[in-house]
Image (cartoon, rainbow, N blue to C red):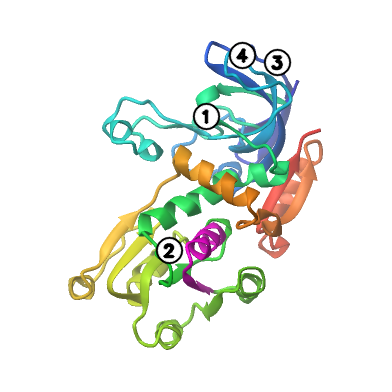
Amino acid sequence: MKTLVCEKPGEWQWRKDEVPQIAPGEVLVKIKRVGICGTDLHAFQGNQAFFDYPRVLGHELSGVIEDAGDSGMEVGQPVLIIPYLHCGECLACRRGATNCCANMRVVGVHQDGGMTEYLNIPSTHVIPADNVDLDSAALVECLAIGAHAVRRGDIQEGDNVVVVGAGPIGLGCVQFAKANGANVIVVDMNDERLAFCEKEFGTQSVKADAGAVDRVGDLTNGEFAAVVIDATGHAGAMMQAVNYCGHSANLVFVGLTKGDITYTHTDLHKRELTVLCSRNATKEDFARVTDLMRTGQVVPSCMVTHRSTFEDMPQAFSEWLKPEAGVVKAVVEIS
């Protein structure tokens, strides 16, 4: 089988491998689609923390069952993969928070991923994707991160919600906040992405400039937001996010920064603000995303702006890195 390896930052190499044999409790998936995310882009550029090379990238994956083993699934059945391999034994796992396992192994990050024709994976981490197209199934992982952030924020029907950052994760947050019945305001620096959110999801838009706080106040009759989700990972935006919060609000950080973030304590205390972090997603989040796709409440196809065949991916990937390419979400097709 063909495998594409990121040999070192900035360098792809093709490799021929044997089709893997499954162990007890595993299934073999013939990979059909690979979604490209920021982790892949950063890893190729050498900017991804805690990353070892060479590495087969790819963790947003869909395909069909090639060998079902003892899983009870059927050969040829469409599936999607949960790439977060948790230990099941640490404090987080014992508390049901498998998304933040202390010993997490992520497919395509800590071990080789899905830029290959076949991948063996524990059957516990495969979800049937019947009645979901392969493109959409590959985007479930990305969207599940947004779904988890929305769940962390405890968004209720009628809430005013601000989502800061209209990248792929932010777009997932927008869709699931809308699915919960919220009024969503998107804050971003990019006019095209703000217009996209208005057209596709019916959100209100605020340009991330010096007047952003006042405009959020105007759109919420001075109450500001019940929930604010930051999906930028930019320290400045994360510190600004508190100013969009109303009293008793929840502030959720799904974006990640390596830098320090600081606040004036009175700004948090007077609001009795609840500050939350949101990492990865659970199996329940993956299942919810898949179910909402089936009912049409979440439509990820509008997010796919670029695509490539497996063979052409190395050249296409270099183009996707350029800011002027305008990539929202790219998908690789493996025939």
Q: Earlier in the sequence, mark 1 or mark 2?
A: 1
Q: Residue at x 70, y 55 (%)?
A: 301
Q: Relative to the observer, which residue lies in front, 207 or 173?
A: 173
Q: Are marks 1 and 3 in contact (CB under 8 Å)?
A: no
Q: Amino acid at mark 4?
A: Gly
Q: Which corner quadrant holds the C terminus?
A: top right
Disc 3 target residue: 19
Q: Amino acid at mark 2?
A: Asp
Task: Give the residue at the far front of this rendering.
Answer: 295
Q: Residue at x 62, y 75 (%)?
A: 198
User: What's the distance in space between the residues labelled 1 and 4, CA to CA?
Assistant: 14 Å
Foreground mark, 2 or 4, reads 4
User: What's the distance in space between the residues labelled 2 and 3, CA to CA?
Assistant: 41 Å
Foreground mark, 3 or 4, reads 4
Foreground mark, 1 or 3, reads 1
Residue 32, given in percent of the width and then of the height, sits at 73, 34
Q: Residue at x 69, y 35 (%)?
A: 12
Instruction: State the SS at label 1.
Output: helix
User: What's the distance in space between the residues labelled 2 and 4, CA to CA?
Assistant: 41 Å
Residue 290, given in percent of the width and then of the height, sits at 59, 45
User: What's the distance in space between the residues labelled 1 and 2, CA to CA?
Assistant: 28 Å
Disc 4 target residue: 69
Q: Amino acid at mark 1?
A: His
What is the number of the mark on residue 125? 1
Residue 261, given in percent of the width and then of the height, sits at 31, 62
Q: Earlier in the sequence, mark 1 or mark 4?
A: 4
User: What's the distance in space between the residues labelled 1 and 3, CA to CA?
Assistant: 19 Å
Q: Magenta residues, as a range? A: 170-188
Q: Earlier in the sequence, mark 3 or mark 4?
A: 3
